[in-house]
Amino acid sequence: MVDLFDASGQGPRPLADRLRPQHLGEVVGQDHLVGPNGALTRLVEAGSLGSLIFWGPPGTGKTTVARLLAGTTTLAFEPLSAIFSGVADLKKVFEAARMRRAGGQGTLLFVDEIHRFNRSQQDAFLPVMEDGTVTLVGATTENPSFALNAALLSRARVLTFHAHDEASILQLLERAEAVEGKALPLDADARLALARMADGDGRAALTLSEEVWRAARADECFDTAGLTAIVQRRAPIYDKGEDGHYNLISALHKSIRGSDPDAALYWLARMLDAGENPLFLARRLVRMASEDIGLADPQALSVALAAKDSYEFLGTPEGELALAECAVYLATAPKSNAVYVGWKKALAQAKASGSLMPPKVILNAPTAFMKQEGYGAGYDYDHDAPDAFSGQNYFPEKLGRQTFYEPVERGFEREIRKRLDYWARLRAERNRS
């Protein structure tokens, strides 16, 4: 019979709980925060934390670090979950903090999932943060810029927790083996596969490890296929941080640039099926709309941004269809990199001639002295000119007119070319006169 209780008569503690760090130096994967020169390390050394917002994906140590911070100070640790708490709970916590403060002790109030509080509930924190009743540490997986009040953010410093990379997950597995006193029954490839299955979540990696140990018989060692069967989780098709990631996104980009909607759908599906972050794909589609389609189809950028918004609104799997629709739209749109090429030319010219001033004729003259110096003298207001076009020069006089943008004869850019040619004729006529 399997013993479901430990020596104390209580249920066994999960591995993730037993491996919870006892001091900041044991935290894995967040060296930018808790390493020797980390942001939190410096705050602790200075002896003044201030209110903080921890932003990062699940399983990266936000709750653990908050508890450890309280241990490095004289502050009382008060945990609260926004999922299970309301205004009444906040009032009780604030009152207890006021009583502690009257007795000479401060309170570190840790609020998990703080983004789940609505705007008015978030406002309730402001007075107790301002008068020092609590030092707030809020944890969120959502972008604080969108999920939290500006007033709350102005009173707290946002610290970003990074998803675990492969190296830090493997480090956690080594610690787990030390605590268990035995090696994970996995070959080298399966060990890497387990690290990737965790998808940057340290807690998930330890939970998967427990499943492996429970399932393994004496002297059994799993390969990747065996691991997949045991934990009922598909091994990643490619490593999102290595060559597979870049090879597949390159294939998607080139399929869209090459106007092949079927290939674009295939590579998009491959990446989503492999567990790629859909918002990464959405960002790349936005870039493709600007780089490869541009003004040949001005709607392409709007379609790409709408696809990103749709995915954020619907999530997986419903939102994936919006990404697929966008990929097909971009692949079938007329192509032009004219804006992309023009921008690179303009940027190079700007770097080479950055000290040149605009011609005085197009500068405003808000003071009498500037009018005296000729600022704005002779400026032709385009709306007063025939065809609403004055034809005057807007480049620095020492540089002269330059051509960066050359629209192609495809899609909407064909119409833009007609306009530019028309304005060029008018400019030449008016400059002759």
Image (cartoon, grey):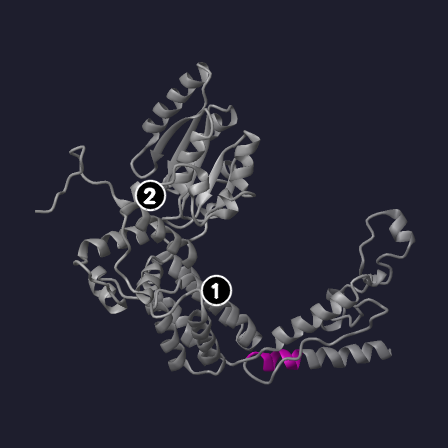
The answer to if 279 sits in the magenta stretch is no
Q: Where is residue 431 in the image (x, y as percent from the top left)?
A: 84, 76
Residue 424 seen from this side: yes
Residue 224 drawn above or below residue 406: above
Residue 212 drawn above or below residue 226: above
Q: State which tag comes first along the sequence, 2 or 1.
A: 2
Along the line of sight, the residue nearer the viewer: 5 or 32: 5
Along the line of sight, the residue nearer the viewer: 114 or 5: 5
Residue 407 drawn above or below residue 395: below
Residue 122 seen from this side: no
Q: Give the range drawn in magenta.
A: 412-419
The quadrant holding residue 233 is bottom left
For marks 2 and 1, give the one nearer the viewer.
2
Element type where label 1 sits in the image? helix
Q: Residue 70 — which label?
A: none
Residue farthest to the right, as pictured:
372
Q: Name the residue under label 2.
A: 19
Q: Name the residue under label 1.
A: 283
